[in-house]
Image (cartoon, rainbow, N blue to C red):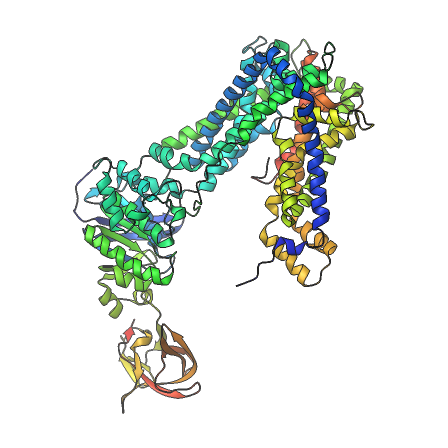
Amino acid sequence: MREVSRDALQLMAVHKRFGPKTVLKHLDLRVGAGEIVAILGPSGGGKTTLLRLVAGLLLPDGGQIIIGGQDATRLPPERRRLGYVFQDYALWPHLSARQHLELVMQGQAAGGAGTVAEVNALLSSVGLLEQAQNRPGQLSGGQRQRVALARALAVRPELVLLDEPYSALDPVLRETLRGDVAALLRAEGRAALHVTHDPDEALSVADRLVVLSGGELVDEGVPERIYQHPRNLASARALGRLNEFQLTSEHGRVSLGELHWPSPVKQSGLTLAFRWEETRPVQGEEPGFTVRLETLFSSRGQRMGRYRLESGEPLLAPLFGALQPGDSTKLTINRPLLF
Amino acid sequence: MRAEPSSTQARSRFPRLGTAGAVLLSVAALLPLIGVLVRGASAVVSVLRGDLDVVWTTLWLVLAGTALSVILGGGLAVLTWLARLPRWTDALLAAGYLVPPFIGAAAWLAALGPGNVLAGRTLVPMYSATGILLAWTTHYAPLAYLLLRATLNAQGDQPILAARIHGLSLSRSLWRVALPLAARGLGATVTLVALSLLGNYGVPAVLGFPAKIYTLATLAYARLLNPALSDPLAAASGVAWLLVLLAVPAFFRSSGDTGEVSGASFPLPVSPALSRVAWSSVWTWTMLAVALPLLALLLLAFQPPYASGFTLANFQTLFEVDSARRGLINSVGLAVGTSLVCALLGLALARAGQGSRLARRAVQLLNLPYLLPGTLLALGMILTLGRTALYATPLFLMLAYLLRFVAPGLENAQAALTPALSQLEFAAQVHGVSPWQRLWRIVLPLLRPQLVASFLVVYPLVLSEVTLSALLYAPGSETAGVNVLNLLSEGNLRSAAAMAVLLLVLGLPTLLVPRGQRA
């Protein structure tokens, strides 16, 4: 195997087709040592294919996959030194938590069988020392998830792959665990590639976000930058619900009510996008656009309204003041995104 | 919370009738078995003293046959599962199981035995333990394959995939993860194959009798027909006792529950080398274990005596013999009738089992005549109904078949009675549809595919049945299977081959059974 780089993972022009459909288009991606990278994107964007290619469950049609500095493009899965936390855990029902770790530690050619102390340390780090003899059927959902993580770490992996690992858990446990897992990965110094379609999860655990859409990397960077200044509409959409309006260009600008933005000369129109929390009522003579409140609802303790513009298009925003359904008000946008 | 309609609610008017029917039928099935055990109890010791060699022969033949069948069938199952061969290869590998064992034995005689169609001289001493093991293995390895493949398929890809990703080699993943997870299915396979071999009469009758190699199944037959014995029925029942004793351990095997396994997954890439090995194994098995003997049987059936070439004379001769014609008509009639009744009765019993615990227990007992060697039921039928007008009539045979083969029909119906069906029936009930209308308009139309499948599962079993038939038939109620055995024992290999070919052709409807429902 050829020594190429010390990043945990490096994809170079990786290309994959299924029949006539191209699912990954010459993708370049790197995950640094100890870095947690979250992959976000719409269904069919190539996230799962990417994970399977890295795991060795699929072979690329082109490009190179480097894991821990070694060319792993054609390596079988067991020789890639990966940990994998499956969506539904994929625990072995006939083995106890301890046996899970012992089995994969025995499988490591370099490290040899894990000692009792090593296994205990790992079980302890995921808080399962007391349940070490329990089989998956005797563990709760959260405990199973922890066994899956401990098994992934037991490999002493170059990279841990997490495939929507919290989707089977209830929301409260999900929030608790994702913080714990990220902390443990950082404490162990393990790099991770975390596939999810939950923006909150991606934003809370990742050092860096990668947005895939249509098989292409459409944006990457630190979570805050992508959230606040996405490079394109696909990237903005990947991080949560947007209000979106197609605006037609007139005299070199696009408008929403009294709000105007310059438009490139060659473009006939632009998409204006903004998140619901970026709206606010206008103050004084400030320009804005008029909306009429249609219905009220609550989301995570926040009173929200479904509004409609004068042009008839719907808009989601917080409920301002004592507005009642049928009332009109004028709003403005803190941070408009124009694509 | 949404209220789940229970099956009990849907059938509240008929639980007593259903329970009474189930209890009555299980008593009818158990009485003959108990009768044999009572009658044979005094003869067990003398059988043990006089025929201990047969007990040992049976034991080692069954153990060797089981080991060979499970190793070969299981090996093919693991190989084709790992290599992800297409599902149609199941049909190639399972084909041997569709050929009744005694016809398989006749086919091997035609291929390798004395005067075979391939070389003209004996290639393998077929009238021997080797011959019996060869015929058993080629019939029961496909059964082991089907059962183990189903177990592996149910396990899904994830366990082995998780093992491979976490650094375990293919062999270690197989040994430490996939096979322990399949332990329960493996145990069930070993049990089922061993019980089938223990109760098999056809193969040792065709290949063992001429060499005076007896198993307990054929010894019971020999004892029953031995005019020198003062009480042949007691002597045969004594042998049946030993059959039960050997079968009992199989019923006490540990279930080895391994818990729930997730099936949702995606497959590992298959190495070209593994794929090549799997494909060659499938084709080697198909050619050697299925095509070779069947081709030999066909050639023999169409070969003129003492000459080469092609003739229909063997079939013509067959149809000129009254007993042969009668045998075919009886076999087809009994197969159609029994299969129809088993399908409907299975459904009625399964519904009764859903409505009452007593009925459920009674219905479970109906598996015994199917799992225990058929010799036991046959002797029990003679003991309980041997002095009635029913004895030695085709109806007598049909009753025996019914008791033996109601279990597969029942199993099919139990699988079909899902909570979803109960819910649909409950929807009709709450909307005021009468019980008969519910049965006629809702249940039967929805279960039509399963009823057809039950029919097609039982049909070939009855069509080629020989264990019960050999002991229960009388002049006038011959069956085609018994005719094949008689023709073989007379040395009339060509006519036997012709009759066997006809039986195979008549058994073709079983190929229409939906995948996974074949018993």
Closest to the observer, A301 or B326: A301
**Residue visible at 74% across and 32% down in the picture:** B399
Q: Is residue A170 left or right of residue B390?
A: left
Residue B102 in sight here: no
The residue lying toward the viewer, choosing from B501 and A88, is: A88
Q: Residue furthest front?
A: B42
Percent x, y of residue B501: 67, 23
Between B27 and A325, the residue placed more toward the observer is B27
Residue B421 rendering spot, x and y as whole percentages: 62, 53
Residue A16 image offset from top left, x and y in percent: 33, 48
Q: Please, which residue is most extreme toward the bottom here?
A: A285
Q: Is residue A138 above or below residue B148?
A: below
B235 sits to left or right of A293:
right
Residue sitting nearer the eye, B345 or A19: B345
Determine the image quadrant of residue A62.
Answer: top left
Q: Is residue B447 left or right of residue B327?
A: left
Residue at 37% in and 44% down:
A135
A60, above or below B149, in the image: below
Q: Quadrant of residue B222?
A: top right
How many marks are shown on the rendered structure?
0
Q: Is residue A304 above or below residue A111?
A: below
**Whether residue B59 is situated above or below residue A291 in the rendered picture:** above
Query: Could you tell me if residue A17 is visible in this image?
Result: yes
Quarter of the picture containing the N terminus of chain A is top left
Q: Position of residue A339 (x, y in %)?
A: 29, 71
Picture quarter containing residue B94? top right
- Left of B442 or right of it: where is A297? left
